[in-house]
Image: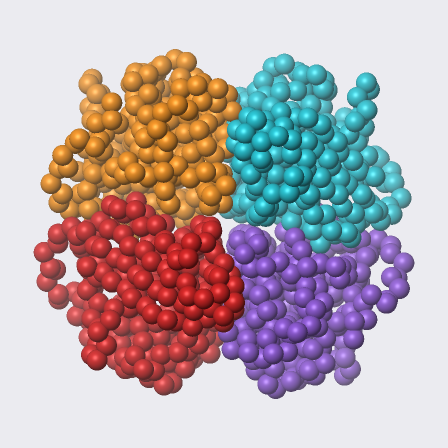
Chain colours: A cyan, B orange, C purple, D red
Amino acid sequence: MDSFQQASPPPTQPLEIRVGFDVALRFPAPTPMIVTLGVHASRVADLLEEDPLQVEPEVPLRLYVDSYGNHCHRLVAPAGVLRLRGSGLVADSGRPDPVLPALKQRPVEELPEEALLFLLASRFCESDLLSPMAWSRFEGGAGGWGRVQAICDFVHEHVRFDYGRSSATKTALQTYESREGVCRDFAHLAIALCRCMNIPARYCTGYLSDIEVPPPHTAMDFHAWFEAYLGDGWHVFDPRNNTPRIGRILIARGRDAADVALTTTFGPSELESFEVWTA
Amino acid sequence: MDSFQQASPPPTQPLEIRVGFDVALRFPAPTPMIVTLGVHASRVADLLEEDPLQVEPEVPLRLYVDSYGNHCHRLVAPAGVLRLRGSGLVADSGRPDPVLPALKQRPVEELPEEALLFLLASRFCESDLLSPMAWSRFEGGAGGWGRVQAICDFVHEHVRFDYGRSSATKTALQTYESREGVCRDFAHLAIALCRCMNIPARYCTGYLSDIEVPPPHTAMDFHAWFEAYLGDGWHVFDPRNNTPRIGRILIARGRDAADVALTTTFGPSELESFEVWTA
Amino acid sequence: MDSFQQASPPPTQPLEIRVGFDVALRFPAPTPMIVTLGVHASRVADLLEEDPLQVEPEVPLRLYVDSYGNHCHRLVAPAGVLRLRGSGLVADSGRPDPVLPALKQRPVEELPEEALLFLLASRFCESDLLSPMAWSRFEGGAGGWGRVQAICDFVHEHVRFDYGRSSATKTALQTYESREGVCRDFAHLAIALCRCMNIPARYCTGYLSDIEVPPPHTAMDFHAWFEAYLGDGWHVFDPRNNTPRIGRILIARGRDAADVALTTTFGPSELESFEVWTA
Amino acid sequence: MDSFQQASPPPTQPLEIRVGFDVALRFPAPTPMIVTLGVHASRVADLLEEDPLQVEPEVPLRLYVDSYGNHCHRLVAPAGVLRLRGSGLVADSGRPDPVLPALKQRPVEELPEEALLFLLASRFCESDLLSPMAWSRFEGGAGGWGRVQAICDFVHEHVRFDYGRSSATKTALQTYESREGVCRDFAHLAIALCRCMNIPARYCTGYLSDIEVPPPHTAMDFHAWFEAYLGDGWHVFDPRNNTPRIGRILIARGRDAADVALTTTFGPSELESFEVWTA
């Protein structure tokens, strides 16, 4: 089950991808919040049209860049409904996720310091608890790229995609045991297993232009994947799709979903409506 | 139960505190590791005598400062027993932990960005799960310093100290439910509850000169406490002792104990012996 | 002199750009050095073929990511000649530098904190000394993108390109006065003027695929440009060429060239040979 | 001239140091500014009384922590006079600056990454230009602590303190040549020379409780000193006083004074009055 190498690459052509969102939340009282819905700092240079966050009613916005390089806005939502909208036109190479099977796993002592944080357990990735399982399953096989691919293959087959079984507090261990989840859960389990094997892994969220929405759902959603540190850098893996895809537009990265919620509200709120698109 | 204000302050005199450790680990195979046993960067200027980490057998050591300002060493432990030793003489004001009841809680929108990370859930502090309990219990009372003190009072009374019930993977929720734990568990539960109430909180580990060791244990150990962001800065709280103490020498800070293990080994190892002292 | 808007965009097609270098330095004694010759962290994901740094004679290499996100290697050069080689195949959108004249200058109070450092004077960009000149010249005209473009137009016309007048310690003020310089000097002067006008600006170095080498020179060199913070992000400007170009491959960013020397040697050394290519 | 070792240490007793400032600036127009006048993050835990920044007229203040760990406030000064006041009571060990002659200079290849930035030339410390002088003068003698002390001795003797010859744009090279300067210039020259010798050095500004004010001046001012990286950490040196002092309260650190101006105004302003005290 290592289908990447055989795939004949699709003809590449550069894309202009229109992305956007329209979210409404209801607040019983004024509530501070952090919004991480803009395109990631590393993709700002590819924006062909500006994509400012629009907020209704209008409130002061403060942009900051968090310790992972994510573009975040701080604001205080007034009581009532808050609507957040944004869109952008992003230049993209049109090239599918690179597959580089020759990349080696770096021994821990050779990893750059900035990668070490991504070896540690985190809220939704209990690598400390999953370690015995991971070693028994993934120690024997190939190292490097092959090992991360084996982890993705395992997660892809072990977990059944089920929109109905999503939960904002579900962890990698719970996904391993329940064998059900959404893209975020696929990513968390694969991240935890990579960390068990001493491969730094970080959580990514963003747009995926050719995402498939399983019936009966018709609406788009954001997608979640991860990056593993192999060779001299970070590389994309997507255990939910488990095949190279085109048009990934990164929004945010972190240790896991706890670090990169698209909206973090410091008080109660209710989702009124939610729409995401890429084209 | 707010005994701090009444306490008559002990007469302050400056201290010279000798601290040290002597740890031996057995490795079945060469194993990379991170050692965070030195005095924290913020206390290096107080070192009256140098405190280099000594490793037996001698192996190359590489010092680095992690994203929290902790002094960490990287090394590869050879197969067999590795002994880590260090000691230092640290100047200390001899002043007990400050008690500043007038300090206010900053609204989230006024917090400096660097504090925001310490509002999020982390491996051992599931503030997302504990939030309803925290709000029902701590919303009504005083804000600011008083609220953090109320959290410490609650944790101090709710949890029974029990050396035997320690576990390296125990979380705040598990401590809340089992009502047993060690200083690290007291800290995790209080941190999680502070974060629920939108007060940034971070985990601290280090030496405490006047630590009490409960019988039948006779050996010292490192201590764990936390810092909460109130007013314009971080302030020490210690829910295990729950009274101001003298001679806290910080070693490391992080989101929780997952970030600041004193030794992190990337492979199996066994603790052979362990000694810590302060005087 | 605002030729960007009129230019009809060239037909875009995605590129695979082969880049590389081959540098030899002679050292009289063993000398520690930092090498920043790899593709920048933000472009690692575009590498279609790995680009490991090769060093002759072989010495231990340690990769790290500096505070600007640059990929740097540390090593100790032995006495004698050290040869550094590397190459890579980089996917590129083939799109010229975006021109976004509608982008506004953010007032200082709305800039994200991470941009503030790039408002301050630095080793080669004495914005403190150039401020009166800058205000008298650039205050009146358009703000935002137009102001940065006016600065680039001014620098492009004021300074004569002269390979022979390059110096590793030449500053923006010296370039302004001598009216001669290389691409690095063009960038330093424009950066200093942007900072005078409260527009954050940072120095960039890397490959430019369609760089023109003025006769009698035939060899390629690395190129220098800068990024200005406009709207919600950093955008490319190139006062040396002063027209949108294709195939910029970033190597490193910093406050100025003092932060991003391609090689920094902590002791004497002599350049023996130097070759750079892009194709 | 190595008077430190012979000095009999004064009897140490802990101090409570009251510090404060009262500054007034006149602005012709609304002007954004950054104020770095609070006690440094590393000393916030020693504050016995809160020290909030007070601004007249009242304007919104936003606290942030910059990349050096400095506590900075952002605000927009209205047209007219702006008055900034603050004070605090700081616990201090009362111990003079430690003298640790046994500390060694780390070879560059063993320095932690976070120290490397402080080896590079910066706006006011042209180590690139001063290198030949530094090597001819300081290569022969002792290494480590002794070398930094030799640099301080040289600067202390070479430069004449002269309040009248201060300039906000004076560099280390200009101080070396003019042989006149204020504490800030002493620090810049010593920092530049340390960097020439591959010793990381960073600029510090703050209160010094027993500062001497040379007649005819009667008013206090802030003080400037520096820290050099020796052994496993940063250590205080003060080439202006060149003898250990008591009661240093750090406000800010950076590469040089360009990074840590006490107030940075992004537009014209005039100093109306200025008062600083420590007791």
Q: List x then y, in percent, for residue A140.
A: 62, 26
Taking depth in this image into account, of A270 and A10 the one nearest to the observer is: A270
Q: Position of residue A235 (x, y in %)?
A: 67, 41
Kindly identify the residue that appears in the image at 38 percent across and 85 percent down.
D177
Q: Is residue B254 left or right of residue A228?
A: left
Along the line of sight, which residue is nearer the eye, B145 or A240?
A: B145
Question: Closer to the camera, C43 or D103?
Answer: C43
Q: Is residue B160 above or below residue B102?
A: above
Please report the residue visible at 61 percent of the width from the left and 82 percent of the height from the top: C176
Instruction: Look at the image and tell me whether residue B248 can be seen.
Output: no
For residue C7, above or below residue A192: below
Using the image, determine if residue B78 lies above or below residue C198.
above
Q: Residue at x 28, y 54 (%)?
A: D87
Residue A40 or C102: which is nearer the viewer?
A: C102
Q: Is there any visible trace of residue C131 in the rendered image?
A: yes
Residue D244 position in % (x across, y down): 20, 64
Q: Quadrant of the N terminus of chain C?
A: bottom right
Name the residue rendered at 29%, 30% in the picture: B238
